[in-house]
């Protein structure tokens, strides 16, 4: 959320207020109007089950196992794209207003990859029916903004 705010600071008509809610997660109010913001994750449920299982096992044993990631796995881009696409489709079906969708990948699919790699992977994501004004793919050190189904900018933290 902070990366989104930092990247858009010049677009706001100050003063602004941000109200945390349940549906959507935030409403940003400025002198122009309201921006309804939803935050979600791109996640693989099976991967989450594995992480949870390992955490439970780690409480009983030492040392904690470090996961192995096959960085040369040719399916990683497709998997990343699918997870992002699923998050977008899932939030496209809610019964409340969302103007801006912030997605954080919670997966190994894009671990140790560059923003350029993520951009390339997003090229295969089907965004033709998206109704959000903007979609942000947010990582710890960068964000990718999609508007009207096109990548419009890359922002670093």
Image (spheres, rainbow, N blue to C red):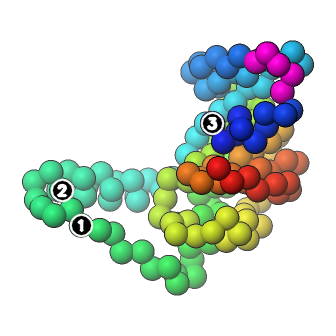
Q: CA distance from mark 1 to mark 2?
A: 8 Å
**Number of other residues with Cα within 10 Å of mark 3, as a class: few under 14, some 14 to 19, many 20 or more:** some
**Number of other residues with Cα within 10 Å of mark 2, as a class: few under 14, some 14 to 19, many 20 or more:** few
Residue at screen point 50% across, 79% down? 71
> Disc 1 on helix, strand or loop?
loop
- The answer to which quarter of the image holds residue 70 is bottom left
- Assign the magenta stretch its main secondary structure: loop
Residue 147, x across and y down, in percent:
85, 47
> Disc 3 on helix, strand or loop?
loop
Q: Is residue 139 visible?
A: yes
Which of disc 2 and disc 1 is earlier in sequence?
2
Instruction: Give the residue at mark 3.
Output: 1
Inspect the magenta stretch and tell me whether residue 15 lies in it. Answer: yes
**Number of other residues with Cα within 10 Å of mark 1, as a class: few under 14, some 14 to 19, many 20 or more:** few
Instruction: Give the residue at mark 1.
Output: 65
Q: Is residue 139 left or right of residue 128?
A: left
Instruction: Give the residue at mark 2.
Output: 58
């Amino acid at each position: 959320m902070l990366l989104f705010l930092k990247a858009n600071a010049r677009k706001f008509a100050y003063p602004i207020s941000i109200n945390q809610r349940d549906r959507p997660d935030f409403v940003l109010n400025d002198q122009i109007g309201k921006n309804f913001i939803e935050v979600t994750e791109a996640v693989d449920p099976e991967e989450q089950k594995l992480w949870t299982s390992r955490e439970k096992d780690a409480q009983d044993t030492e040392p904690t196992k470090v996961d192995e990631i096959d960085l040369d796995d040719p399916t990683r881009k497709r998997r990343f794209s699918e997870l992002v696409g699923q998050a977008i489709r899932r939030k496209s079906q809610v019964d409340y207003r969302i103007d801006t969708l912030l997605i954080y990948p919670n997966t190994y699919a894009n671990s140790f990859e560059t923003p350029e790699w993520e951009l390339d992977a997003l090229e295969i994501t089907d965004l033709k029916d998206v109704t959000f004004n903007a979609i942000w793919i947010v990582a710890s050190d960068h964000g990718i903004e999609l508007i009207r189904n096109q990548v419009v900018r890359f922002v670093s933290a």
